[in-house]
Image: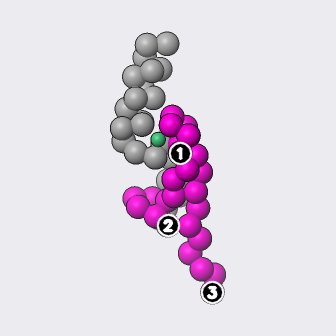
Amino acid sequence: MSRPEVRSKPCAYCGRPFTDRKRWSGRDQWDQVLYCSRGCRAKAAAQRRRA
Ligand SMILES: [Zn+2]
């Protein structure tokens, strides 16, 4: 049996590394997650709008 790995990657907005242990554990969504939090996701979306 394989251990559940705790994957991590840097947030696309703030650059902080975050893990998938919260909401995305065991789901394929992990590949689609770019931001560490809803806040970063919202800010990134706002920036895209302005740009
Ligand atoms: Zn972030």
> Considering only vertical position in the picture, is 50 above or below 28?
above
Pointer 1 residue Cβ closer than 8 Å to ligand 1: yes
Mark 1 falls on what kind of element? loop
Colour option used: one colour
Name the residue located 36 percent from the left edge and 41 percent from the top edge: 38
Residue 46 image position (x, y, % from top left) = 39, 22
Which stretch appears magenta? Answer: 1-25
Name the residue located 51 percent from the left edge and 58 percent from the top edge: 19
Mark earlier in primary sequence (3, 2): 3
| Amino acid type indicated by mark 2 | Gly
| Amino acid type indicated by mark 3 | Met
Residue 43 image position (x, y, % from top left) = 40, 29
Residue under pointer 3: 1
- Magenta: main secondary structure equals loop
* Farthest-out residue, right: 2
Residue 22 image position (x, y, % from top left) = 41, 61
**Looking at the image, can residue 10 be seen?**
yes
| Amino acid type indicated by mark 1 | Arg
Mark earlier in primary sequence (3, 1): 3
**36 sits to left or right of 17:** left
Residue 4 image position (x, y, % from top left) = 56, 75
Name the quadrant containing residue 23: bottom left
Name the residue located 55 percent from the left edge and 50 percent from the top edge: 17
Residue under pointer 2: 26
Residue under pointer 1: 16
Q: Does the magenta portion include 14?
A: yes
Disc 3 versus disc 2: distance between alpha carbons? Answer: 15 Å
Viewer-proximal residue among 5 and 18: 18
Q: Quadrant of the N terminus?
A: bottom right
Q: Does the magenta portion include 9?
A: yes
